[in-house]
Amino acid sequence: MLNAERRPSVAERRSSFLSGSLQNSMNIPVVPHLAGIEDPLPETTPDKVDVLIAGTGMVESVLAAALAWQGSSVLHIDKNDYYGDTSATLTIDQISNWVNEVNSGTSSLSVCYTNAKLYISKSLRHSNTYVSRDFGIDLSPKILFAKSDLLSILVKSRVHQYLEFQSLSNFHTYENDSFEKLTNTKQEIFTDQNLSLMSKRNLMRFIKFVLVWDEQPEIWQQYAEKPISDFLVEKFKLENNQLYELIFSIGLCYNLDVKTPNALQRIRRYLTSFDVYGPFPVLYSKFGGPGELSQGFCRSAAVAGSTYKLNSQLLSFNPTTKEAVFKDGSKIKVEERVIVSPTQAPLDSKNIPKQEYEVHRLTCIVEKSCSEWFGEGESAAVVVFPPNSLKSNNRTVVQAFIVGSGTESCAKGTCIWYLSTVETGPRAELDLDAALEALERSIIRESSTDLENENDLIQLGPNGQTIINSVKLGQSFKEYIPREKVQFLLKLYYTQFTSTPPFDVVTPSVFEFSKEWPKDSSLLVPGASDNNIVYTSMPCAEISYDDVITAAKVLYEKIVGSDDDFFDVDFEDEDIPTYQNNGDVQYQNTFEEDDEEDEARDMDIVENEEPMGEMEI
Amino acid sequence: MNSNVASVKLVLLGEAAVGKSSIVVRFVSNDFSENKEPTIGAAFLTQRVNIDDHTIKFEIWDTAGQERFASLAPMYYRNAQAALIVYDVTKPQSFIKARHWVKELHEQASGDIVIALAGNKVDLIEENGENERKVATEEGQKLADEENLLFFETSAKTGYNVNEIFLAVGDKIPLKRPNDNANENGSGNNQNSSRVQLTDANANAANAGNCSC
């Protein structure tokens, strides 16, 4: 839309405040627009706002913050007494209530989730060891690629300052009943004893190509509609186990049929994220994933002046009077747009988009640290079960995100396993169960101290460090009869619906609406409480956050007219020289982590000295 | 200087209009500390204070209005090492609310959080006489004694006891050396070794495209 229609940005609105504050006081420096600091805020909600948002999930929260900093007035509500909605991080008690609500069938939650089954062990329920708040369980767990649009927005918006991030470098592929750690760096490819010289060459040639794949359409064009596996075998002569690693662990795809460009994009995502912050491709936030990030963006929106109200449910919206009515009887006039998460739809809704795709999830809390799976100094790992690797003859990948107590999402000595699949129907649960069993066997085997033939399994390296031989580990798996069982503190199955098909990140058609309120009343559904409401999409199956910014930007553009100034915020500590101290502090922190950088540089040197890097076929 | 700087997250709590933000503005704009200019980002206000041989960098979180409809996020309390609960000595209701916040902190925050209670706006009493006072000093002191809080009556307007209350908080914060943090669980600290600073990418970003090929 036209620029003339746009509301003034926050910076524009603030200039009067800046000059006022300078005149009024001698020694009080310029204070940014921080809600509550300028004037005490009123105890009542405003009479009218530009945008009403219901649901505090990831997309809605990013949208709220983007709109607030742009200058829109936003009322952001959630019917729950916690932040996060579909992205929430919940305690044990909150999970119990959530499951009851899904199963009650009376709430709009039942449109979005089904088949919730919860098992809580006696030792968790009546325990002096654990309390409900020790655990933060993500409803849609996510990992953050080091080079991604969300990460840039986190930095640009300063929301990252509210959060703590940790690195995740271990991606395991499950094959032949054992875990293979991913060969993901050039260095590892060259030192991997199991790869032949020819394999190494082919793999290197592919990695060189994939980093610039979109600039070389001549190489992949004829495979544009064909599966990636054909492309990799025919064009790069890669072997099966390399295919699996590239497609499933690095690319995090769901099956071998994924189309070539899709998979290339995803493989590159991993490789370009590697070494941005250190020798790892992804990060995750402490205390919970999307639930924490949502809170961060909501706080950012609040700082920019948005009003927040939990425990507040939208009852209806009337597009003619532009009046929204809430359960507590209060009303508000909405000038621009009402955005609602499907979970927060008012009763008598008739316009919720169809949520036709399934994501099946199984979340477990186990009484084991599972540190065997984590990289050094880390507390999380990703395990991928490729098609046909499980007892259930799975057709589709099962992905597992393992989160240890170092993330402070669970109590010491426990670990959360998040399993998910896009398989449909009853097969999905069979696959999840088979993957769970494989994880269970593996962790018992790896953490067991009463091995009979320990000497066969652990080899000492030349410097005396232990090297676990993964091939032998795999062999012994088949013979190994576990003597102990993993103690499960909690098991939670549920099916989540989404309007986003696997592999897509957003379905733009969901957000199709005109900027003007319709004058044609025939477009309105008679008797519906949600005419003219725009629904956000449920989280998609994607294990990364890749959908979030895209979805928020689409909505932002529809409301504001363009996404040019999406989080285009001038924070005053950049504008005013006296505030540069903030930058100094950041750099101090930078130097504290010199180790990681040095490692990265070391690795570069190794790579450059490696003569095989220059070989071409 | 950078070897002895400890970051301390301090959260502000209190009823609307008790002057909690004014206290902070007074604190960060005063020139009693070596580092005069407060650093202000969109995230929180910061101020450095020198105590003995070390420096404390307060990261002061304002509620940003999210407390109005009981909508403060758990993130607000998370890893807070200190809290400043403010009430207005001329408004009994605000003192009742202060009790509520003490309870809330005991439930939500980490066990070793240092809490300070500020009975603000004593300047009104000096101006208008003792009749103006609705919360006795003894009442505030009693609550502080019961709950093990630091207690000061303050005036953001005149600056009375403002620096003192922050210095007292800084004094009471258990000092952690960077090396002690490795196995630290819960009462978090920014110097955590496993933490990745997202602003560090610039150093590596230029190489990021090449690193894997």
Image: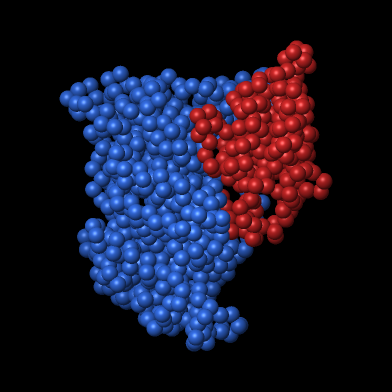
Color used for chain A?
blue
Residue B205: horizontal and vertical position, in percent? 51, 55
Residue A10, placed above or below residue B194 = above
The C terminus of chain A, quarter of image:
bottom left
Q: Nearer the viewer, residue A481 or A496?
A: A481
Q: Nearer the viewer, residue A40 or A206?
A: A40
Q: Which chain is red?
A: B
Indicate the colouring scheme: by chain
Dividing the picture into quadrants, the one containing residue A423 is bottom left
- Residue sticking out furthest to the right: B52
Q: Is residue B101 left or right of residue B167?
A: left
What residue lies at 33% left-to-right and 68% top-to-bottom?
Answer: A434
Relative to A554, say whether A483 is above or below: below
* Residue drawn 64% across the image and 31% down it: B99
Is residue A66 in sight in this rendering? no
* Residue B180 x, y percent position in the rendering: 70, 59
Where A181 sits versus A73, above or below? below
Residue at 37% over, 27% down: A327
Residue B148 seen by the camera: yes
Asked whether, in this view, residue A536 is left or right of residue B22, the answer is left
In percent of width and height, residue B76 lies at: 57, 40
Residue A3 placement, left or right of B158: left
Tell me the quarter of the image containing the N terminus of chain A: top left
Q: Position of residue A355 (x, y in %)?
A: 26, 45
